[in-house]
Amino acid sequence: MQSEIPLDATPLRGAVQARRAQLSPPALHAECERAKAQGARLIALWGCDDTDLGRGFVLHVALLLRAGLLCIDVPLGTEHPHYASIADIFPAALRMQRAAYDLLGIHAQGSPDQRKWLRHGAWPGGVFPLRRSVAADARFEPSEDHYPFVRVEGEGVHEIPVGPVHAGTIEPGHFRFSIVGEAVLRLEERLGYKHKGIEKRAQGMTVEEGARLAGRVSGDSTVAYACAYAQAVEGIDGIEVPPRALCLRSILLELERVHNHLGDLGYLGNDVALAFGFFQFWRLKETVLRAIALLWGHRYAMDQIVPGGVTRDLPAEGPQRLFELCGALEREVSTLRGIYDEHAGVQDRFMGAGRVAPELAESLGLTGLAGRASGVACDLRVDHPCVPYDRLDVRMATHAAGDVAARVAMRFDEVIESLRLIRVLLGQMPAGEVHVPLGPAASGFGIGLVEGWRGEVLVAVEIGADARLRRLHPHDPSWQNWPLLERAVLDNIVPDFPLINKSFNLSYSGQDL
């Protein structure tokens, strides 16, 4: 029987068990088929322009197997770089392939969808802004954006366009509903309107500057992105992070999970007209954010996690404050869960809405919290635990219903478990330093992978011979989950879309690079 990871794959140093292998373009499809048959999941797909080094274009595919992470490099040459689409194996690859073409001109042959994804009217066709030949400060004349949305024909079918600009203070995204009456026949999304230029901006940055940028990819996941970036750099440089710093990183990751889940539980109450739930959960979220600000100097702990450790230790009174916070939150969240569970109007709206069946979730690659709500039992803290999660015995919650009610229940379960983990971490907190200084940055490739509150957050980093960043690729789990939202809303009514959408609460910013 073949091994899960190719025998010629080379280990990558870092917090996550990872290996790197090189395949020719014709071999990629077969390797992905073999990996999928053994239970592999696609984590990310992206490209790189190495023409300035004489290596041409390279496609990177990150797969998560039972034995760990496998990063496959596929050299594509310099003229008309192309490869065979893997979207028939991993459907989640489809939009990633389209993005790789828009940014680098890397073509996925045989792809079922060849439409542009990120380009909109911001730059002309035939221009690929992530290529080395395009300057970071390049400016393009905006052009008209004729996007071929899929039309649903038939008697009584109407379209409702929503966005990209929304009434709330959220990132832009366009939703095109095809409906009969109030029933949704089809939803088509279009994202990526901001064109932030994160990947281009990273080129030439120092490692320290890159850490600040990584923490700003998606603001509600700043800890997860900063941690994954730090892991990648530490793997390249061979840095041993102090145990106390690793413990503090995990506490911050769990606090990030807690405050995001609390906010979502409030919004979900608000979407079913339970204003009481909104105010109570946002009161609790504000309590957590103020505690983080008091202990770490920033409400979202931005810039606290850096390569080599963390920038600030807990103050002397910090552990006791966190113990008290966790105890108070556990009591109040348990009470509020009882109110949500026993409220007939709330449950009537939650149950059955936006269902993603476990079979569909598994086949299309639904991940993270939303995946676990549909029976996909994947959590890096359990399946591939890094220090200190390897000694915490994390209790992974799953539900099989796959509806809004299941995703609400997942949030309640995970808040309680995160509060338990924080207290365990505080009790096991080792003494010592919280940061080791970085030496001269080594050149090389590194990868970090963290279970953020939405799901797996990956950051791939390449450092050049000049000790500066050649390539930074951050990947948000929302790439995998946005297409499933299109499925979840089918046969539901239009007024339920805000509720279903919020039950996923996917990141616009995290995939708008």
Image: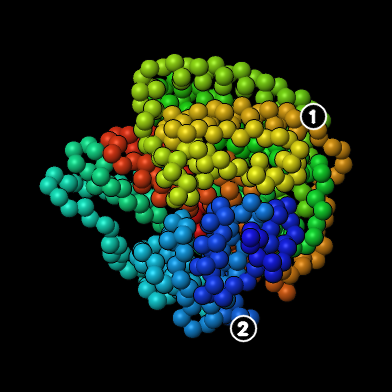
Is 331 situated left or right of 188 in this image? Answer: right
Position above or below: 457 against 268: below
User: 403 and 178: which one is in front?
Assistant: 403
What is the secondary structure assignment of the residue under circle 2?
loop
The residue that appears at 39% across and 28% down in the rendered structure is 350
Q: Position of residue 55 (x, y in %)?
A: 61, 80
- Residue under label 2: 54
Q: Given contact means CB atoms under 8 Å apart, are the residues at marks 2 and 1 in contact?
A: no
Q: How is the image coloured?
A: rainbow
Q: Position of residue 298 (x, y in %)?
A: 65, 40
Q: Position of residue 59 (x, y in %)?
A: 55, 70
The kind of residue tagged 2 is Gly
Q: Is residue 231 visible?
A: no
The residue that appears at 41% across and 57% down in the rendered structure is 193
Instruction: Indicate which disc residue 267 carries.
Output: none
Q: CA distance from mark 2 to mark 1?
A: 52 Å
The residue that appears at 71% across and 34% down in the rendered structure is 393
What is the secondary structure assignment of the residue under circle 1?
helix
Position above or below: 16 against 490: below
Is 60 situated left or right of 189 in this image? Answer: right
- Residue under label 1: 427
The kind of residue tagged 1 is Gly
Categorize mark 1 by other alpha carbons within 10 Å: few (<14), some (14-19), many (20+).
few
The residue that appears at 44% across and 36% down in the rendered structure is 402
User: 59 and 23: which one is in front?
Assistant: 23
Q: Position of residue 469 (x, y in %)?
A: 66, 67
Position above or below: 374 against 163: above
In this rendering, the count of numbered labels is 2
Q: Residue furthest front?
A: 1
